[in-house]
Amino acid sequence: MATVTIGKKACAINPLKMSQPIGGAFAFMGLRGSMPLLHGSQGCTSFGLTLFVRHFKEAVPLQTTAMSEVATVLGGYENVEQAILNIHNRTKPEIIGICSTGVTETKGDDVEGYLKLIREKHAQLANFPMVYVSTPDFKDAFQDGWEKTVARMVEVLVETPKNAARRDPARVNILPGCHLTPGDLDELRTILEDFGLEPSFLPDLAGSLDGHIPDEFVPTTIGGISVDEVAAMGQAAWTIVIGAQMRRAAEALEKKAGVPYRLFERLCGLAPNDEFISFLSEISGRPVPLKYRRQRGQLADAMLDTHFHIGGRKLAIGAEPDLLFDLSSMLHEMGAKVMAAVTTTQSPVLERVLTDDVLIGDLEDLENLAKARDCDLLITHSHGRQAAERLKIPFHRAGFPMFDRLGAGHQLSVGYRGTRELIFSISNLLIADHEDNHEPTPDTWRAGEADAPDTADAATMH
Protein backbone atom coordinates (compact mmCIF):
# COMPACT_ATOMS: atom_id res chain seq x y z
CA MET A 1 0.00 0.00 0.00
CA ALA A 2 1.44 3.36 -1.06
CA THR A 3 1.81 6.23 1.39
CA VAL A 4 0.17 9.41 0.07
CA THR A 5 1.84 12.69 1.04
CA ILE A 6 1.12 16.31 0.18
CA GLY A 7 3.92 18.62 -0.93
CA LYS A 8 4.71 21.47 1.48
CA LYS A 9 6.33 23.93 -0.94
CA ALA A 10 5.21 27.57 -0.83
CA CYS A 11 4.44 27.52 -4.57
CA ALA A 12 4.23 25.13 -7.50
CA ILE A 13 7.16 25.06 -9.92
CA ASN A 14 6.23 23.79 -13.37
CA PRO A 15 2.72 22.76 -12.25
CA LEU A 16 1.45 19.30 -13.01
CA LYS A 17 -2.22 19.93 -12.31
CA MET A 18 -4.81 21.77 -14.37
CA SER A 19 -7.55 23.67 -12.55
CA GLN A 20 -11.06 22.57 -11.54
CA PRO A 21 -13.01 24.98 -13.79
CA ILE A 22 -11.10 23.75 -16.83
CA GLY A 23 -12.06 20.19 -15.94
CA GLY A 24 -15.68 21.25 -15.51
CA ALA A 25 -15.75 23.10 -18.85
CA PHE A 26 -14.18 20.03 -20.49
CA ALA A 27 -17.09 17.88 -19.27
CA PHE A 28 -19.64 20.32 -20.67
CA MET A 29 -17.94 19.99 -24.07
CA GLY A 30 -19.24 16.43 -24.25
CA LEU A 31 -22.83 17.69 -24.63
CA ARG A 32 -24.29 18.51 -28.06
CA GLY A 33 -24.93 22.20 -28.73
CA SER A 34 -23.26 23.15 -25.46
CA MET A 35 -21.65 26.44 -24.49
CA PRO A 36 -19.43 26.24 -21.41
CA LEU A 37 -19.29 29.52 -19.46
CA LEU A 38 -16.66 30.34 -16.84
CA HIS A 39 -17.89 32.79 -14.21
CA GLY A 40 -14.74 34.80 -13.63
CA SER A 41 -12.22 37.07 -15.28
CA GLN A 42 -11.32 36.94 -18.96
CA GLY A 43 -7.84 35.65 -18.15
CA CYS A 44 -9.20 32.49 -16.52
CA THR A 45 -11.08 31.59 -19.67
CA SER A 46 -8.41 32.56 -22.19
CA PHE A 47 -5.84 30.39 -20.41
CA GLY A 48 -8.13 27.36 -20.46
CA LEU A 49 -9.13 28.00 -24.05
CA THR A 50 -5.48 28.06 -25.09
CA LEU A 51 -4.88 24.67 -23.46
CA PHE A 52 -7.87 23.08 -25.21
CA VAL A 53 -7.06 24.49 -28.65
CA ARG A 54 -3.41 23.45 -28.45
CA HIS A 55 -4.34 19.95 -27.26
CA PHE A 56 -7.10 19.16 -29.77
CA LYS A 57 -6.06 21.47 -32.64
CA GLU A 58 -9.76 22.34 -33.01
CA ALA A 59 -12.04 25.35 -32.50
CA VAL A 60 -13.29 25.11 -28.91
CA PRO A 61 -16.39 26.95 -27.61
CA LEU A 62 -15.75 28.62 -24.25
CA GLN A 63 -17.21 31.88 -22.93
CA THR A 64 -16.71 34.08 -19.86
CA THR A 65 -18.73 36.45 -17.69
CA ALA A 66 -15.70 38.79 -17.90
CA MET A 67 -15.68 39.90 -14.27
CA SER A 68 -13.78 43.14 -13.61
CA GLU A 69 -12.37 44.18 -10.22
CA VAL A 70 -15.42 46.35 -9.49
CA ALA A 71 -17.95 43.71 -10.59
CA THR A 72 -16.18 41.13 -8.45
CA VAL A 73 -16.46 43.27 -5.34
CA LEU A 74 -20.07 44.36 -5.95
CA GLY A 75 -21.34 40.96 -7.15
CA GLY A 76 -21.64 39.29 -10.53
CA TYR A 77 -25.40 39.05 -11.13
CA GLU A 78 -25.43 41.53 -14.02
CA ASN A 79 -22.42 39.88 -15.67
CA VAL A 80 -24.00 36.43 -15.43
CA GLU A 81 -27.33 37.73 -16.75
CA GLN A 82 -25.75 39.54 -19.70
CA ALA A 83 -23.50 36.62 -20.59
CA ILE A 84 -26.41 34.16 -20.60
CA LEU A 85 -28.62 36.47 -22.68
CA ASN A 86 -25.84 37.11 -25.21
CA ILE A 87 -25.06 33.41 -25.56
CA HIS A 88 -28.72 32.42 -25.81
CA ASN A 89 -29.54 35.05 -28.42
CA ARG A 90 -26.42 34.84 -30.57
CA THR A 91 -25.17 31.24 -30.52
CA LYS A 92 -28.49 29.41 -29.95
CA PRO A 93 -27.07 26.66 -27.72
CA GLU A 94 -29.01 23.64 -26.48
CA ILE A 95 -27.53 24.04 -22.99
CA ILE A 96 -25.29 26.46 -21.08
CA GLY A 97 -22.92 24.99 -18.52
CA ILE A 98 -21.55 27.42 -15.92
CA CYS A 99 -18.41 26.82 -13.84
CA SER A 100 -17.26 29.14 -11.09
CA THR A 101 -13.64 30.26 -10.63
CA GLY A 102 -11.57 31.29 -7.65
CA VAL A 103 -12.38 35.00 -7.96
CA THR A 104 -16.15 34.59 -7.79
CA GLU A 105 -16.00 31.80 -5.19
CA THR A 106 -13.94 34.03 -2.90
CA LYS A 107 -16.57 36.77 -3.26
CA GLY A 108 -19.28 34.19 -2.58
CA ASP A 109 -21.58 34.77 -5.58
CA ASP A 110 -24.86 32.84 -5.25
CA VAL A 111 -25.04 31.71 -8.86
CA GLU A 112 -27.92 29.28 -8.25
CA GLY A 113 -29.88 32.27 -6.91
CA TYR A 114 -28.83 34.33 -9.93
CA LEU A 115 -30.16 31.64 -12.30
CA LYS A 116 -33.48 31.54 -10.47
CA LEU A 117 -33.84 35.33 -10.82
CA ILE A 118 -32.85 35.22 -14.49
CA ARG A 119 -35.45 32.54 -15.26
CA GLU A 120 -38.14 34.58 -13.51
CA LYS A 121 -37.14 37.79 -15.30
CA HIS A 122 -36.73 36.37 -18.83
CA ALA A 123 -39.57 34.12 -20.00
CA GLN A 124 -37.52 32.62 -22.86
CA LEU A 125 -35.11 31.17 -20.28
CA ALA A 126 -37.75 29.77 -17.91
CA ASN A 127 -37.21 26.16 -19.04
CA PHE A 128 -33.91 26.52 -20.85
CA PRO A 129 -31.31 23.96 -19.65
CA MET A 130 -28.63 25.64 -17.53
CA VAL A 131 -26.34 23.75 -15.16
CA TYR A 132 -24.13 25.47 -12.57
CA VAL A 133 -21.18 23.77 -10.86
CA SER A 134 -19.02 25.14 -8.06
CA THR A 135 -15.41 24.64 -9.20
CA PRO A 136 -13.06 27.07 -7.40
CA ASP A 137 -9.57 26.84 -8.84
CA PHE A 138 -7.84 27.49 -5.50
CA LYS A 139 -8.55 23.88 -4.48
CA ASP A 140 -8.73 20.43 -6.04
CA ALA A 141 -7.78 19.75 -9.68
CA PHE A 142 -8.88 18.94 -13.24
CA GLN A 143 -10.25 15.51 -12.35
CA ASP A 144 -12.34 16.95 -9.49
CA GLY A 145 -13.91 19.55 -11.77
CA TRP A 146 -14.87 16.87 -14.28
CA GLU A 147 -16.26 14.61 -11.54
CA LYS A 148 -18.40 17.34 -9.95
CA THR A 149 -19.72 18.52 -13.31
CA VAL A 150 -20.83 15.09 -14.51
CA ALA A 151 -22.51 14.41 -11.16
CA ARG A 152 -24.29 17.77 -11.34
CA MET A 153 -25.45 17.09 -14.93
CA VAL A 154 -26.98 13.83 -13.70
CA GLU A 155 -28.74 15.58 -10.81
CA VAL A 156 -30.17 18.36 -12.98
CA LEU A 157 -30.84 16.75 -16.37
CA VAL A 158 -31.71 13.08 -15.84
CA GLU A 159 -35.42 12.40 -15.42
CA THR A 160 -36.77 9.84 -12.96
CA PRO A 161 -38.53 7.08 -14.97
CA LYS A 162 -42.22 6.69 -14.26
CA ASN A 163 -42.12 2.92 -14.61
CA ALA A 164 -38.94 0.99 -13.82
CA ALA A 165 -40.36 -2.11 -15.53
CA ARG A 166 -40.08 -0.34 -18.86
CA ARG A 167 -36.28 -0.22 -18.80
CA ASP A 168 -34.65 -1.21 -22.08
CA PRO A 169 -32.25 -4.15 -21.43
CA ALA A 170 -30.14 -3.18 -24.44
CA ARG A 171 -29.53 0.39 -23.28
CA VAL A 172 -26.38 1.03 -21.25
CA ASN A 173 -25.07 4.28 -19.77
CA ILE A 174 -21.32 4.91 -19.85
CA LEU A 175 -19.77 7.40 -17.42
CA PRO A 176 -16.13 7.82 -18.59
CA GLY A 177 -13.43 9.55 -16.55
CA CYS A 178 -11.54 12.57 -17.85
CA HIS A 179 -8.46 10.40 -18.47
CA LEU A 180 -10.15 8.74 -21.46
CA THR A 181 -9.64 10.29 -24.90
CA PRO A 182 -12.21 10.60 -27.72
CA GLY A 183 -10.35 7.70 -29.33
CA ASP A 184 -10.90 5.60 -26.20
CA LEU A 185 -14.63 6.37 -26.25
CA ASP A 186 -14.89 5.36 -29.91
CA GLU A 187 -13.21 2.06 -29.07
CA LEU A 188 -15.59 1.45 -26.17
CA ARG A 189 -18.59 2.29 -28.35
CA THR A 190 -17.49 -0.29 -30.93
CA ILE A 191 -17.00 -2.97 -28.26
CA LEU A 192 -20.42 -2.32 -26.71
CA GLU A 193 -22.22 -2.30 -30.05
CA ASP A 194 -20.54 -5.60 -30.98
CA PHE A 195 -22.38 -7.10 -28.00
CA GLY A 196 -25.69 -5.69 -29.27
CA LEU A 197 -25.81 -2.94 -26.64
CA GLU A 198 -26.86 0.67 -27.20
CA PRO A 199 -24.46 2.92 -25.25
CA SER A 200 -25.07 6.50 -24.10
CA PHE A 201 -21.89 8.29 -23.03
CA LEU A 202 -21.97 11.16 -20.54
CA PRO A 203 -19.99 13.19 -21.45
CA ASP A 204 -19.44 12.11 -25.07
CA LEU A 205 -16.21 13.77 -26.20
CA ALA A 206 -15.96 11.30 -29.08
CA GLY A 207 -18.90 13.08 -30.67
CA SER A 208 -17.66 16.63 -30.14
CA LEU A 209 -13.84 16.63 -30.03
CA ASP A 210 -12.84 13.76 -32.30
CA GLY A 211 -11.52 16.09 -35.00
CA HIS A 212 -14.26 15.82 -37.61
CA ILE A 213 -15.04 18.80 -39.85
CA PRO A 214 -18.66 20.03 -39.84
CA ASP A 215 -20.45 21.04 -43.03
CA GLU A 216 -20.77 24.60 -41.72
CA PHE A 217 -19.49 26.64 -38.80
CA VAL A 218 -21.28 26.04 -35.51
CA PRO A 219 -20.49 28.33 -32.54
CA THR A 220 -21.31 25.63 -29.96
CA THR A 221 -20.04 22.06 -29.62
CA ILE A 222 -20.59 20.15 -32.86
CA GLY A 223 -21.49 16.76 -31.44
CA GLY A 224 -21.86 14.76 -28.26
CA ILE A 225 -24.85 13.55 -26.27
CA SER A 226 -28.03 15.65 -26.47
CA VAL A 227 -29.94 17.01 -23.48
CA ASP A 228 -32.87 14.73 -24.36
CA GLU A 229 -30.60 11.67 -24.37
CA VAL A 230 -29.23 12.62 -20.96
CA ALA A 231 -32.78 13.00 -19.65
CA ALA A 232 -33.58 9.46 -20.83
CA MET A 233 -30.55 7.80 -19.18
CA GLY A 234 -32.83 6.63 -16.35
CA GLN A 235 -34.39 4.12 -18.78
CA ALA A 236 -31.16 2.15 -19.23
CA ALA A 237 -30.63 -1.26 -17.67
CA TRP A 238 -27.06 -0.64 -16.49
CA THR A 239 -24.51 2.10 -15.95
CA ILE A 240 -20.87 1.27 -16.66
CA VAL A 241 -18.47 3.51 -14.76
CA ILE A 242 -14.86 3.89 -15.91
CA GLY A 243 -12.51 5.39 -13.34
CA ALA A 244 -12.97 5.77 -9.59
CA GLN A 245 -13.62 9.49 -10.10
CA MET A 246 -17.02 8.66 -11.63
CA ARG A 247 -18.44 6.80 -8.63
CA ARG A 248 -20.14 9.97 -7.37
CA ALA A 249 -22.00 10.48 -10.68
CA ALA A 250 -22.99 6.80 -10.80
CA GLU A 251 -24.39 6.96 -7.27
CA ALA A 252 -26.35 10.10 -8.19
CA LEU A 253 -27.82 8.32 -11.22
CA GLU A 254 -28.70 5.24 -9.18
CA LYS A 255 -30.34 7.38 -6.49
CA LYS A 256 -32.37 9.45 -8.95
CA ALA A 257 -33.33 6.83 -11.53
CA GLY A 258 -32.62 3.49 -9.88
CA VAL A 259 -30.12 2.35 -12.52
CA PRO A 260 -27.55 -0.09 -11.06
CA TYR A 261 -23.90 0.50 -11.89
CA ARG A 262 -20.68 -1.46 -12.29
CA LEU A 263 -17.38 0.30 -11.67
CA PHE A 264 -14.23 -0.51 -13.63
CA GLU A 265 -11.34 1.43 -12.14
CA ARG A 266 -9.19 0.83 -15.20
CA LEU A 267 -9.44 -0.64 -18.69
CA CYS A 268 -5.77 -0.82 -19.62
CA GLY A 269 -4.24 -4.27 -19.24
CA LEU A 270 -5.16 -7.90 -19.79
CA ALA A 271 -7.02 -8.79 -16.58
CA PRO A 272 -9.20 -5.61 -16.43
CA ASN A 273 -10.36 -6.17 -19.99
CA ASP A 274 -11.09 -9.83 -19.34
CA GLU A 275 -13.38 -8.68 -16.53
CA PHE A 276 -14.97 -5.99 -18.73
CA ILE A 277 -15.63 -8.31 -21.67
CA SER A 278 -17.07 -10.98 -19.37
CA PHE A 279 -19.45 -8.44 -17.85
CA LEU A 280 -20.65 -7.32 -21.29
CA SER A 281 -21.27 -10.94 -22.27
CA GLU A 282 -23.23 -11.43 -19.05
CA ILE A 283 -25.54 -8.41 -19.37
CA SER A 284 -26.07 -8.81 -23.11
CA GLY A 285 -26.64 -12.56 -23.01
CA ARG A 286 -24.31 -12.99 -25.98
CA PRO A 287 -21.08 -14.97 -26.33
CA VAL A 288 -17.84 -13.05 -26.71
CA PRO A 289 -17.30 -12.33 -30.44
CA LEU A 290 -14.35 -14.11 -32.02
CA LYS A 291 -12.96 -10.68 -32.83
CA TYR A 292 -12.18 -10.06 -29.15
CA ARG A 293 -10.86 -13.54 -28.51
CA ARG A 294 -8.36 -12.87 -31.29
CA GLN A 295 -7.53 -9.41 -29.93
CA ARG A 296 -6.88 -10.95 -26.52
CA GLY A 297 -4.43 -13.41 -28.09
CA GLN A 298 -2.72 -10.55 -29.92
CA LEU A 299 -2.34 -8.61 -26.67
CA ALA A 300 -0.88 -11.65 -24.89
CA ASP A 301 1.64 -12.06 -27.71
CA ALA A 302 2.45 -8.33 -27.64
CA MET A 303 3.08 -8.55 -23.89
CA LEU A 304 5.54 -11.38 -24.48
CA ASP A 305 7.29 -9.38 -27.21
CA THR A 306 7.54 -6.14 -25.23
CA HIS A 307 8.31 -7.32 -21.71
CA PHE A 308 12.00 -7.62 -22.67
CA HIS A 309 12.05 -3.84 -23.16
CA ILE A 310 9.63 -2.71 -20.41
CA GLY A 311 10.53 -5.24 -17.71
CA GLY A 312 12.93 -3.82 -15.11
CA ARG A 313 12.47 -0.21 -16.21
CA LYS A 314 12.35 2.35 -13.40
CA LEU A 315 9.28 4.44 -14.06
CA ALA A 316 8.54 8.06 -13.06
CA ILE A 317 4.94 9.05 -13.73
CA GLY A 318 2.98 12.25 -13.12
CA ALA A 319 -0.75 12.30 -13.86
CA GLU A 320 -4.27 12.75 -12.52
CA PRO A 321 -5.08 9.96 -10.02
CA ASP A 322 -7.11 7.65 -12.28
CA LEU A 323 -4.64 7.92 -15.16
CA LEU A 324 -1.74 7.39 -12.76
CA PHE A 325 -3.37 4.27 -11.33
CA ASP A 326 -4.33 2.96 -14.78
CA LEU A 327 -0.95 3.31 -16.52
CA SER A 328 1.26 2.48 -13.54
CA SER A 329 -0.72 -0.70 -12.79
CA MET A 330 -0.45 -1.92 -16.37
CA LEU A 331 3.29 -1.19 -16.59
CA HIS A 332 3.88 -2.83 -13.20
CA GLU A 333 2.21 -5.95 -14.60
CA MET A 334 4.66 -5.73 -17.50
CA GLY A 335 7.60 -5.80 -15.07
CA ALA A 336 8.34 -2.07 -14.71
CA LYS A 337 9.07 -0.64 -11.26
CA VAL A 338 7.16 2.51 -10.28
CA MET A 339 9.91 4.47 -8.52
CA ALA A 340 8.41 7.99 -8.60
CA ALA A 341 4.67 8.81 -8.64
CA VAL A 342 3.33 12.37 -8.46
CA THR A 343 -0.32 13.35 -8.79
CA THR A 344 -2.61 16.36 -8.48
CA THR A 345 -5.36 15.63 -5.95
CA GLN A 346 -6.60 13.12 -3.38
CA SER A 347 -8.28 9.89 -4.52
CA PRO A 348 -9.02 6.49 -2.96
CA VAL A 349 -7.01 4.71 -5.69
CA LEU A 350 -3.72 6.39 -4.77
CA GLU A 351 -3.06 4.06 -1.83
CA ARG A 352 -3.26 1.12 -4.25
CA VAL A 353 -0.67 2.44 -6.70
CA LEU A 354 2.07 -0.20 -6.70
CA THR A 355 4.88 1.91 -5.29
CA ASP A 356 6.19 3.03 -1.90
CA ASP A 357 4.83 6.56 -1.91
CA VAL A 358 2.68 8.90 -3.99
CA LEU A 359 3.25 12.65 -3.75
CA ILE A 360 0.63 15.30 -4.47
CA GLY A 361 2.96 17.84 -6.01
CA ASP A 362 4.31 19.35 -9.23
CA LEU A 363 6.63 18.49 -12.09
CA GLU A 364 9.68 19.77 -10.20
CA ASP A 365 8.94 17.16 -7.54
CA LEU A 366 8.62 14.51 -10.24
CA GLU A 367 11.94 15.50 -11.80
CA ASN A 368 13.77 15.50 -8.47
CA LEU A 369 12.37 12.10 -7.51
CA ALA A 370 13.18 10.65 -10.93
CA LYS A 371 16.77 11.87 -10.63
CA ALA A 372 17.24 10.69 -7.06
CA ARG A 373 15.80 7.25 -7.79
CA ASP A 374 17.61 6.78 -11.11
CA CYS A 375 14.47 6.44 -13.24
CA ASP A 376 14.87 5.63 -16.92
CA LEU A 377 11.35 6.32 -18.25
CA LEU A 378 9.19 9.41 -17.69
CA ILE A 379 5.43 9.56 -18.34
CA THR A 380 3.41 12.76 -17.97
CA HIS A 381 1.82 15.45 -20.14
CA SER A 382 3.69 17.78 -22.48
CA HIS A 383 4.87 20.14 -19.76
CA GLY A 384 7.26 17.38 -18.65
CA ARG A 385 9.34 17.50 -21.81
CA GLN A 386 12.02 19.80 -20.37
CA ALA A 387 12.46 17.53 -17.34
CA ALA A 388 12.94 14.51 -19.61
CA GLU A 389 15.56 16.42 -21.61
CA ARG A 390 17.47 17.33 -18.46
CA LEU A 391 17.25 13.79 -17.14
CA LYS A 392 18.19 12.39 -20.57
CA ILE A 393 15.58 9.62 -20.39
CA PRO A 394 12.76 8.55 -22.76
CA PHE A 395 9.54 10.52 -22.43
CA HIS A 396 6.05 9.16 -23.15
CA ARG A 397 3.33 11.81 -23.30
CA ALA A 398 0.04 10.98 -21.60
CA GLY A 399 -2.80 13.05 -20.19
CA PHE A 400 -3.83 16.67 -20.70
CA PRO A 401 -2.45 18.85 -22.19
CA MET A 402 -0.49 17.31 -25.03
CA PHE A 403 0.37 20.16 -27.39
CA ASP A 404 3.71 19.24 -28.95
CA ARG A 405 2.53 16.10 -30.73
CA LEU A 406 -0.39 15.47 -33.09
CA GLY A 407 -3.23 13.04 -32.46
CA ALA A 408 -3.74 13.60 -28.74
CA GLY A 409 -7.49 13.12 -29.12
CA HIS A 410 -7.00 9.78 -30.85
CA GLN A 411 -4.47 8.26 -28.45
CA LEU A 412 -5.77 4.84 -27.45
CA SER A 413 -5.22 2.89 -24.22
CA VAL A 414 -8.48 1.00 -23.45
CA GLY A 415 -9.47 -2.50 -24.47
CA TYR A 416 -7.19 -5.25 -25.73
CA ARG A 417 -6.34 -3.24 -28.84
CA GLY A 418 -5.63 -0.03 -26.94
CA THR A 419 -3.38 -1.77 -24.42
CA ARG A 420 -1.50 -3.43 -27.27
CA GLU A 421 -0.95 -0.12 -29.05
CA LEU A 422 0.22 1.54 -25.84
CA ILE A 423 2.83 -1.07 -24.92
CA PHE A 424 4.12 -1.11 -28.51
CA SER A 425 4.41 2.70 -28.42
CA ILE A 426 6.33 2.70 -25.14
CA SER A 427 8.55 -0.21 -26.21
CA ASN A 428 9.44 1.45 -29.51
CA LEU A 429 10.29 4.63 -27.59
CA LEU A 430 12.67 2.64 -25.39
CA ILE A 431 14.20 0.86 -28.37
CA ALA A 432 14.80 4.17 -30.17
CA ASP A 433 16.42 5.63 -27.06
CA HIS A 434 18.72 2.62 -26.77
CA GLU A 435 19.71 2.89 -30.42
CA ASP A 436 20.40 6.62 -30.11
CA ASN A 437 22.51 6.34 -26.96
CA HIS A 438 24.02 2.87 -26.94
CA GLU A 439 24.42 1.64 -30.53
CA PRO A 440 28.09 0.89 -31.19
CA THR A 441 29.74 2.59 -34.18
CA PRO A 442 32.60 1.41 -36.41
CA ASP A 443 34.94 3.73 -34.46
CA THR A 444 34.11 2.07 -31.14
CA TRP A 445 34.53 -1.37 -32.70
CA ARG A 446 38.06 -0.48 -33.79
CA ALA A 447 38.82 1.05 -30.40
CA GLY A 448 37.70 -2.13 -28.67
CA GLU A 449 35.02 -0.27 -26.67
CA ALA A 450 32.32 -2.68 -27.82
CA ASP A 451 32.09 -6.07 -29.35
CA ALA A 452 32.28 -5.81 -33.12
CA PRO A 453 29.60 -7.53 -35.20
CA ASP A 454 30.50 -10.63 -37.09
CA THR A 455 32.11 -10.33 -40.53
CA ALA A 456 28.89 -10.79 -42.48
CA ASP A 457 27.09 -8.06 -40.54
CA ALA A 458 30.05 -5.71 -40.87
CA ALA A 459 30.20 -6.30 -44.62
CA THR A 460 26.51 -5.59 -44.92
CA MET A 461 26.85 -2.29 -43.07
CA HIS A 462 29.75 -1.15 -45.25
Image (cartoon, rainbow, N blue to C red):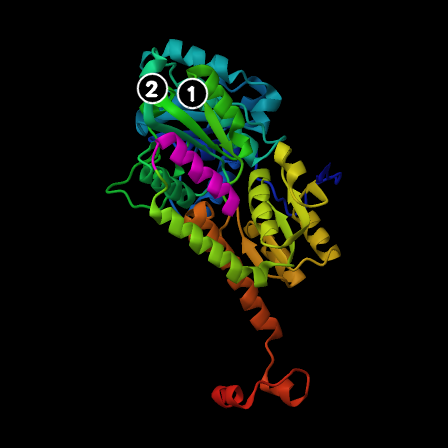
Instruction: Report whether 92 appears left or right of 393.
Output: left
Above or below for 408 versus 389: above
Residue visible at 34% across and 14% down? Answer: 165
Secondary structure at badge 2 equals loop
Please name the residue that numbered disc 2 is placed on.
167
In magenta segment, residue 321? no
Q: How many marks?
A: 2
Label 2 with label 1: CB-CB less than 8 Å? yes
Tag 1: amino acid: Val
Q: Which residues are magenta?
A: 270-286
Q: Which mark is residue 91?
A: none
* Viewport quadrant of the N terminus: top right
Would residue 150 appear left or right of 448 to someone viewing this image? left
Marks 2/1: CA–CA distance: 9 Å
Q: Secondary structure at mark 1?
A: loop
Q: Amino acid at mark 2?
A: Arg
Residue 137 position in % (x across, y down): 59, 31
Say which of 262 and 217 sits in front: 262
Q: Which residue is mark 1?
A: 259
Provide residue 457's location: percent of width, then percent of height.
51, 86
Question: Dot 2, how many residues are within 10 Å of its Cα: few (below 14), some (14-19), or many (20+)?
Answer: some
Q: Is 355 placed above or below 300 here?
A: above
